[in-house]
Image (spheres, helix red, strand yellow):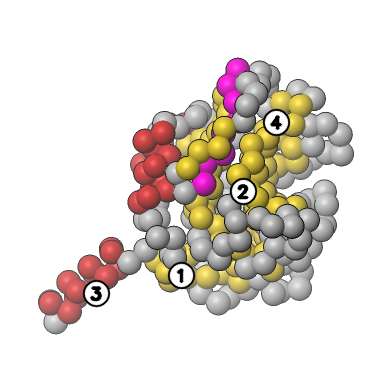
Amino acid sequence: MKKLFTFCLMLLLLSPCWAGVDLTGAENDGVNFGNSEFSLTQSITVSCWVKYDTLTQNAHANIFAKRTGGAQPFISYQLKATDGSADDSLNFSVGLNLIRSSGNFDVGTTTEWVHILGTWSDGNPVRLWVNNINQVSSINYSGTIQFNASFDNIIGYDDQDANRGFNGKVSEAAIWDVVISDNEIALLANSKVKGIPLQIQPANLQFYAPLDDFVDGTNLNTDANGYKDRSGNGNDGQGVDADTDSLNIAEQILSYP
């Protein structure tokens, strides 16, 4: 029995098993984490793991973002996916004063889990990392991240545009109020282990939602504070799924090589 227990424990530790939310891309399917500004002013790191199911051609799919309204800069921060005529593109944007600054990364059509991470600090370019490969904006941007308390931090849908839902899986969402180091970015992308954000600059970790709070195959939980912010800052989230077709997932084997 002891040998069997040890073997099962080794499998658990070595197999990159994941949990998260599986979203349909329908209007308002996702998780709302409230309107916190996460103490962000002049630097930011946003990170998560995603796996596309489908992307609608020429559509913009919100993965993780906070909006500012219908005028420039439109967003405080945003990770999104876009399906072009040939390649799927990932994008990270930061809303600074009246500027929406962006970095893009063409990833081709993929059905694998990918790690995406965006960074910016005052006077520096917007940077987008996909599986630890960096795409750098050619422009240095200065300013302060803009916020609007009327809009929330949302995974999976856009609270301003109902046609920009993300159809796919999301896990391990995190935000720091600093730019983390290249080595720390590599650790996030290559570790394939849940909980790594808790080990990286914990004093500056403003938000961390593993999205593993509920049983595999169940509908998104719509209770207030159901999806926990494990950073200790209390920005818990609530599932939003009016047509009950999005799910919690567990024990997903990461196909990222």
| Residue picked out by circle 2 | 106
Q: CA distance from mark 2 to mark 3?
A: 39 Å
Foreground pick, 90 / 200? 90
Q: CA distance from mark 1 to mark 2?
A: 25 Å
The 10 Å Cα crowd at callout 3, few under 14, some 14 to 19, many 20 or more, is few
Residue 51 in view: yes
Q: Is residue 161 magenta?
A: no
| Residue picked out by circle 4 | 101
| Residue picked out by circle 3 | 8
Write down the quadrant of residue 138 in the picture.
top right
Kindly report which numbered mark, 3 or 4, lies closer to the viewer in this rendering: 4
Which quadrant of the figure contains the C terminus? bottom left
**Residue type at mark 3?**
Cys
- Which element is circle 2 on? strand
The 10 Å Cα crowd at callout 2, few under 14, some 14 to 19, many 20 or more, is some
Earlier residue among tags 1 and 3: 3
| Residue picked out by circle 1 | 252
Q: CA distance from mark 3 to mark 4?
A: 47 Å
Write down the quadrant of residue 142 in the picture.
top right
Q: Furthest-front residue in view? A: 86
Earlier residue among tags 3 and 4: 3
